């Protein structure tokens, strides 16, 4: 049996996958054979054909075969992706990161080894065929992966032990704090009980003193407020009286001005001044008329 470096379980998984791939390949080859047979049965019914007819038949056959091959390649690629998905999902459960080397997929030596493995060991009636093909996650007992998992488990166990120790320390500190709190509460209650009456009397006296002070301040405030109201009323009355006096003085001043103007109009100086102004106005009108006549003559 060809040696791929697998354990027995993984070797059986490879055989199951190769059996699946071979069955899919055989089914696709049968489909391609049927394409050729359909061409023979439907088109090759005459003894002679022209070049165009042969070319047309070959083109049609090419389209069918190309579609079947392309479908098989696509399906194979997608199947491989699902297989990798299963492997990666199982690896992630153990916090592993698998890596692939794409260049190894074209290694001719390994490909020939796989082909030789399929020819010599891959037999339909082998006992492997009788085993269940259901995916299983076998225990990891090999060197590198097992050691890595053991180190991870040890690290997690150490972290767990440290957390437990830290938790015990916090619980001890919490209990100590609760004891101190209980002692402080008992001491406070004892102090309140011993000094309760004395403190109550002092508080009552302080409340009485504060009530007296507040009452005195309220009375003083009301007195000041009443005085301010009276002073405001006196100021308002004085303002009204001053306004009345102002109006009366303004009225007397207006009457005196009218009387003075009337007396001034009755004086000889006022009459002479008015007569002079009248003559001056007439003289100005005469000069304007002359000026207009000279401008019209020009």
Image (tube, rainbow, N blue to C red):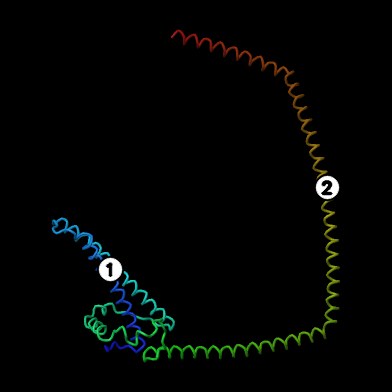
* 1 vs 2, front mark: 1
**Residue 156, relative to residue 240: is it above or below?**
below
**Residue closer to the observer: 239 or 91:** 91
**Residue 266, relative to residue 67: is it above or below?**
above
Residue beneath disc 2: 233
**Residue closer to the observer: 195 or 255:** 195
Q: Measuring from the top left, give residue 120's x and y in whole percent.
A: 25, 86
**Residue closer to the observer: 293 or 41:** 41
Element marked by disc 1: helix
Q: Measuring from the top left, give residue 59's x and y in whole percent.
A: 20, 60
**Residue 198, relative to residue 39: is it above or below?**
below
Residue beneath disc 1: 31
User: Which label belongs to residue 277?
Assistant: none
Q: Measuring from the top left, give residue 89's x and y in whole percent.
A: 41, 78
Element marked by disc 2: helix
Give left or right: position of 21 versus 211. left
**Residue 41, relative to residue 177: is it above or below?**
above
Point out the image quarter for the N terminus. bottom left
Label 1 Cα neighbours within 10 Å, binned few <14 / some 14-19 / many ≥20: some
Q: Please name the residue shown 35% across and 74% down the image.
A: 81
Q: Measuring from the top left, give residue 2's x and y in whole percent.
A: 26, 88
Q: Please name the residue shown 28% across and 70% down the image.
A: 28
**Residue closer to the observer: 157 or 170:** 157
Q: Please name the residue shown 34% across and 81% down the image.
A: 16
Give left or right: position of 118 versus 209. left
- Numbered circles on residues, count: 2
């Amino acid at each position: 049996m060809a040696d791929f470096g697998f354990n027995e379980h993984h070797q059986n998984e490879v055989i199951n996958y190769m059996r699946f791939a071979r069955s899919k390949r055989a089914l696709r080859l049968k489909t391609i054979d049927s394409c050729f047979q359909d061409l023979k049965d439907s088109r090759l019914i005459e003894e002679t054909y022209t070049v165009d007819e042969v070319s047309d038949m070959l083109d049609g056959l090419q389209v069918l075969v190309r579609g079947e091959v392309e479908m098989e390649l696509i399906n194979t690629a997608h199947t491989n992706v699902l297989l990798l998905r299963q492997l990666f999902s199982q690896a992630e459960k153990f916090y592993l990161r698998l890596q692939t080397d794409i260049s190894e997929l074209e290694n001719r030596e390994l490909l020939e080894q796989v082909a030789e493995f399929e020819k010599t060991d891959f037999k339909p009636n082998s006992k492997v065929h009788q085993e269940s093909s259901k995916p299983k996650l076998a225990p990891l007992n090999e060197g590198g992966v097992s050691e890595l998992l053991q180190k991870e488990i040890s690290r997690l166990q150490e972290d767990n032990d440290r957390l437990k120790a830290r938790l015990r320390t916090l619980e001890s500190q919490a209990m100590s704090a609760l004891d101190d709190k209980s002692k402080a509460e008992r001491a406070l209650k004892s102090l309140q009980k011993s000094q309760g009456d004395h403190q109550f009397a002092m508080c009552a006296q302080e409340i009485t003193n504060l009530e007296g002070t507040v009452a005195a301040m309220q009375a003083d405030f009301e007195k000041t407020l009443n005085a301010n109201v009276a002073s405001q009323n006196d100021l308002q009355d004085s303002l009204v009286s001053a306004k009345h006096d102002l109006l009366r003085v303004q009225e007397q001043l207006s009457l005196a001005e009218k009387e003075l103007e009337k007396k001034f109009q009755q004086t000889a100086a006022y009459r002479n001044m008015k007569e002079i102004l009248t003559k001056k106005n007439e003289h100005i009108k005469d000069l304007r008329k002359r000026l207009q006549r000279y401008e019209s003559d020009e």
